[in-house]
Image: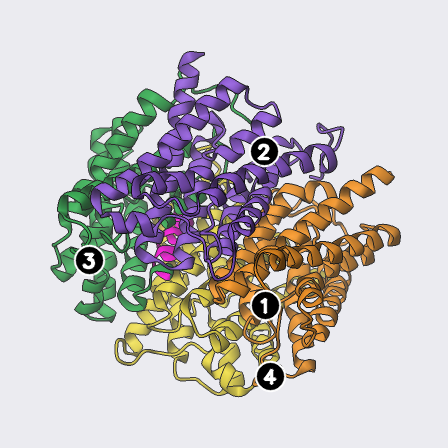
Chain colours: A green, B purple, C orange, D yellow
């Protein structure tokens, strides 16, 4: 069992590392919306497809929180996952720093567009977009009626869309580790409230909405196809 | 049964909310074609994958109309879905307003390019592009010979393509709720005829074309793979 | 049987119409590489997913030629498909003309970049890119060892990639109907050799390469998963 | 058996040819990040879907190295694959040269951004991004618990993301053949260390990480769905 947790923790750390490395490098260097949102969604798709059947492929402390509330992981496991995810995020940003410079990492950190949104609004936006992401996790992974094999793509798609919507407002984190990694490496903590509180609130909302409203009682039902 | 309709109505409202929130925020802030059409197609893909096996994942009053004509939903159910979809669309645009400002919502509303197209032309364009979208729904969801598990991606793909084609002409709504949400919040109703009448006409055309011409009589046939 | 051919011909015409309508409108109005190649690949993906289990979802006279060589369609059927595909392509461009103007359709027609490539080179480029596309059709549709359900995405992906590579050289047709539709409507025939001869040559090359070199003799073998 | 190796070698050469042709043409002509990374990921997706069930669809000497370490191919087979892959890459770049000119091929060759990264850093970046790619291969192809049918998309997604992250730093090769092809044709060898050593190191890291840490002992276990 210990061995299994270690394996899963490494998988979660590597997955989160890949997400943060790819998004920080793309946003920091290319600095365009489309490559950044494609990189975010597609690296997650690839890594969830590769590692999701082992550790679950959360790579996101907000998803870990939702799975804890849904009793798909226990408190000790969730704590191990959180440590692995934040450590992976920091390592991903550190790898960018080692080969490029601090400016790149700082430019790859989620930031608020102060002209359009304040801190409360940014938290709300991140909560809403993460709620969609976590609903997709519930609907395609937790719900047994979902078509098989599609969860990596649906999760990646939700990240492309959510980060496209928020990139010019909050930086489009949808994941506390996505913000924490480059922030701890570059020292840019200005948007910490939005990328930390927003996704966690969104995960709780998605769990409540899915569990108490949308999910069928007969969750093992026949499904649609 | 009432409970089931409530659950489905919430799912349809949340799905439509997510589509309108993401597209209004992306078009309103980023104001570029590629992130907008990716956000539109990919949020729909994710939400159809997550919620489609419950409520059907229409998130679009034009698709609801086509399913009513195809007797996949009854008139009471369709009415409930329409209310949920328009309410979800309005709520999605309202969420953008709460955290940003009216200009963002107005810029995220479908608008006509008067230099290139008039109202009649815009209705025709929206009808044609929505006809393709609804044909995809018929061919991948209603038709039992379709490969399993691919409908969320095919539907999302039709939205990426259709909205890319029309973005510079009509705003690329393909969905009355996509136009209604930001219009009711921002007061920009100039393109209402195109995003309301166009998709509904397209849905009727797709239903007629699929039902009377393309569909096989033996719709439970062996299929191709 | 006649009825079945009619149904299939309508499906091929509608599918080709959708491809030409979407690409001509996107290239003619947005005039950017990314939305155009996404629109091309994603509308094809959606339509192949929706209609492919009926008519085969070729939507392309070059694919029809390859399937004729591979004996998946007979000469009468292929002739019907060719008529349907060219008619659908013309109708798709005509729909754009009806609501916009001739300049849009002309701008949406594949054109040669004379600074970089001559007619012979353009034919070669279209042949090579179409060869990749038709190899994908052979490998995912004709070959029974392919993973199920993936052919619409693989075909759409080959079109995104091939049209991205050629957009600035030949216009990236990969399909005679993609060129014929806007050419017959706008009168822009300058690149006709490249979009007509190139894809047909590419289809023959792909058929020969697949049939005589790559395909296993035991084409009903166990496959890889 | 010889016949089988010939068939597989042709498939590997054609697949690698297609990847290099498409990426060199797109980067050399369009010279924008988004079309380039889409072309790279989507041509790989299409070709892996089409040819992967025969030769494995590696199209990349780094993946061949990882499969050799994992004993999925023997040393003679790996040598044949390497020759086929480098020859295919050279042929892909040569096809671009034949129809365009040397400047296009040179512009399509991976190059270092000297302002941001040195040779050691470039090797490290390529190693990290290729490690993610090869982990996806292990997790979706080698691991039998992976959802079926998704490996072409997961691999294509890892290439979209990895090349988006590195395009402005190292050129985003992730594949020695991707660099070798245009380099041998254009004479641009400046980034050879990064696109040759980086991906090979990344493949070894991915193999070690997957085999000794992440993979379950009971690799034929029940899996998650």
Residue at left offset 71%, top offset 27%: B220
- How crowded pointer 1 is (Cα within 10 Å; few <14, some 14-19, many 20+) is rated as many
Q: Give the residue at mark 4.
A: C114
What are the residue bounds of the magenta stretch?
A35-50
Q: Are marks 4 and 1 in contact (CB under 8 Å)?
A: no
Q: Which of label 2 and label 1 is nearer to you?
A: 2
Compute the Cα span from label 4 to label 1.
24 Å
**Residue A83 appears in the picture as rendered:** no
Label 2 in the same subunit as label 4: no
Q: Which of label 2 and label 4 is nearer to you?
A: 4
Q: Give the residue at mark 2.
A: B141
Compute the Cα span from label 2 to label 1.
34 Å
Badge 4 element: loop
Residue at left offset 55%, top offset 19%: B74
Q: Nearer the viewer, residue D96 or D200?
A: D96
- How crowded pointer 3 is (Cα within 10 Å; few <14, some 14-19, many 20+) is rated as many
Q: Which of label 4 and label 3 is nearer to you?
A: 4
State the image coordinates of residue B56 (x, y, percent, origin top left): 50, 29
Q: Are marks 3 and 2 in contact (CB under 8 Å)?
A: no
Q: Is residue B8 above or below residue D45?
A: above
State the image coordinates of residue C149 (x, y, percent, origin top left): 60, 42
Badge 3 element: helix
Residue at left offset 40%, top offset 53%: B36
- Left or right of D5? Residue C115 is left
State the image coordinates of residue B164 (x, y, percent, origin top left): 49, 55
Q: Quadrant of residue C40?
A: bottom right
Badge 1 element: helix
Q: Nearer the viewer, residue B131 or B218?
A: B131
Q: Chain of mark 3?
A: A
Compute the Cα span from label 3 to label 2.
43 Å
Q: Which of label 4 and label 1 is nearer to you?
A: 4
Q: Give the residue at mark 3.
A: A182
């Amino acid at each position: 069992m210990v061995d299994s947790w270690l394996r899963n923790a490494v998988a979660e750390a590597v997955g989160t590392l890949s997400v943060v490395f790819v998004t920080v490098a793309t946003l920091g260097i290319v600095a365009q919306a489309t490559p950044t949102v494609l990189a975010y969604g597609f690296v997650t798709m690839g890594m969830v497809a590769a590692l999701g059947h082992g550790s679950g492929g959360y790579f996101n402390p907000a998803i870990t929180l939702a799975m804890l509330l849904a009793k798909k992981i226990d408190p000790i496991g969730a704590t191990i996952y959180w440590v692995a995810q934040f450590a992976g995020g920091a390592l991903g940003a550190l790898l960018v720093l080692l080969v490029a410079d601090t400016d790149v990492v700082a430019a790859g950190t989620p930031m608020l567009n102060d002209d359009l949104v304040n801190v409360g609004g940014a938290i709300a936006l991140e909560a809403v977009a993460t709620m969609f992401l976590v609903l997709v996790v519930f609907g395609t992974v937790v719900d047994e009626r979902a078509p098989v094999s599609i969860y990596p793509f649906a999760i990646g798609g939700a990240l492309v869309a959510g980060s496209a919507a928020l990139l010019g407002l909050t930086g489009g984190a949808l994941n506390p580790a996505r913000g924490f990694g480059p922030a701890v490496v570059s020292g840019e903590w200005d948007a910490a409230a939005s990328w930390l509180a927003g996704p966690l609130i969104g995960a709780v909302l998605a769990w409540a909405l899915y569990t108490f409203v949308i999910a069928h009682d007969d969750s093992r039902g026949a499904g649609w196809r």
